[in-house]
Image: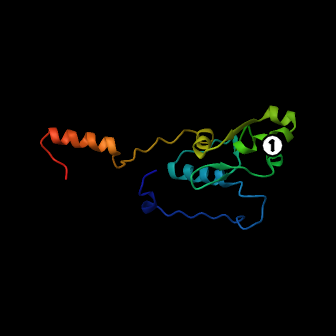
Amino acid sequence: IDEDFHQKLDLHIHVPEGATPKDGPSAGIAMCTALVSALTGIPVRCDVAMTGEITLRGEVLPIGGLKEKLLAAHRGGIATVVIPLENEKDLAEIPKNIKDKLSIVPVRWIDEVLQLTLQTVPAPKTVNRPLSGDDAQNKQAEKSESGVRAH
């Protein structure tokens, strides 16, 4: 995603059900995945469902109602369901015949979600960061040898 993407396009996010009381913010990773898909042009796989809250740092948090969500995914013909790692303990409540027919993948971070749900993984963007202490000293030594002195 280009750093200046927000200057090239308008982005409108409309969540009409957002104000409706629910069991929790379980659509967070789905909305994040949809945004990444829209901004990169990489489609989301059609055989995957996902549920989980997401923090600002990309950590996937637990949700409620896992049993109902897995049953709905099974009825909908979904092959893979991405769930929060902290909900793995709740799989004991899920009937064996449902667990056997679904690939249930527990995750902790959004990058894991994107690897599982997007048709291809976005290429990492290289970021020019300030040099750390050792790197800065090495760079200074290189410049000194070349006759250029950093100020």
In the figure, is residue 125 to the left or right of 21? left
Q: Residue furthest bottom?
A: 19
Instruction: Give the image quarter of residue 98.
Output: top right
Identity, as a three-letter code, of the amino acid under mark 1 = Asp
Q: Which residue is mark 1?
A: 90
In the figure, is residue 123 to the left or right of 54? left
What residue lies at 86% left-to-right and 33% top-to-bottom? Answer: 97
In the figure, is residue 39 to the left or right of 61? left
What residue lies at 56% left-to-right and 64% top-to-bottom? Answer: 12
Is 107 drawn above or below residue 20 in the view shown? Answer: above
Give the SS element for disc 1: helix
Number of numbered discs on residues: 1
Q: Residue furthest top?
A: 100
Q: Which residue is more in the foreground, 77 or 17? A: 17
Q: Which residue is more in the foreground, 44 or 146? A: 146
Color scheme of the displayed model:
rainbow
What residue lies at 55% left-to-right and 38% top-to-bottom? Answer: 120
Q: Residue furthest left?
A: 147
Instruction: Give the image quarter of residue 143.
Output: top left
What residue lies at 40% left-to-right and 44% top-to-bottom? Answer: 126
* Callout 1 crowding tier (Cα within 10 Å): few <14, some 14–19, many ≥20: few
Give x and y (percent) for residue 118: 59, 42
Q: Which residue is more in the foreground, 62 or 67? A: 62
In the figure, is residue 67 to the left or right of 48? right
Give x and y (percent) for residue 116: 62, 39
